[in-house]
């Protein structure tokens, strides 16, 4: 998938919109769904792939700067209120998560990462 993700481009305006939405969610200590972000950012098809690529890029930037992963704030609409499996796979590639990408270990790690994101003071520029 990383080969596909690298081919996806988003505008500077869309990138800033994503950062703004995540900053707002963090300030309000709320999670946001993939669908809500796609709608708010008005992403054209393939919207989910574009959003996933942007979130993976943001996760890589955060990991490189030794910050909690802001992409943890984005979840699926399902009852478990967790990100898609790709988020956990990405976090694993970045050396942040080690374990099965579904189940209690993933849910527990995600809850901790969300708490770290809520408590971290991010600079204005990623």
Image: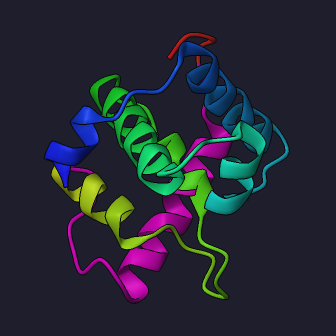
Residue plotted at (22% across, 46% down) = 4
Residue at 68% across, 27% down: 17
Q: Quadrant of residue 92?
A: bottom left
The quadrant of the rendering that contains the N terminus is bottom left
> Image quadrant of residue 98?
bottom left
Question: In this picture, is 9 found above or below 28?
Answer: above
In this view, the residue farthest toward the right is 28
Image position of 26 (left or right of 76): right
Q: Is residue 15 left or right of residue 105?
A: right
What's the magenta region?
A: 94-122
- Residue 100 coordinates in the image, percent (x, y): 24, 81
**Image spot of residue 119 (x, y percent):** 65, 40
Residue 25 drawn at (x, y percent):
76, 44
Residue 121 shows in the view = no
Question: Can residue 59 be spotted in the picture?
Answer: yes
Q: Give residue 15's quadrant in the image.
A: top right
Q: Residue at x 23, y 35 (%)?
A: 6
Between residues 13 and 92, which one lies in front from this camera angle?
13
Of residues 101 and 8, the one nearer the viewer is 8
Say whether residue 115 is magenta.
yes
Which residue is pictured at 49% across the width and 56% down the height? 48
């Amino acid at each position: 998938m990383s080969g596909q993700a690298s081919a996806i481009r988003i505008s500077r305006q869309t990138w800033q919109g994503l950062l703004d939405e995540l900053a707002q969610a963090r300030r309000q200590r709320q999670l946001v769904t993939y669908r809500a972000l796609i709608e708010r950012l008005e992403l054209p098809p393939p919207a989910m792939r574009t959003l996933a690529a942007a979130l993976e890029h943001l996760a890589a930037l955060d990991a490189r700067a030794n910050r909690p992963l802001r992409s943890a704030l984005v979840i699926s609409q399902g009852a478990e209120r967790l990100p898609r499996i790709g988020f956990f796979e990405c976090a694993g590639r970045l050396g942040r998560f080690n374990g099965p990408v579904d189940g209690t270990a993933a849910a527990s790690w995600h809850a901790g990462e969300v708490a770290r994101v809520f408590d971290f003071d991010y600079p204005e520029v990623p």
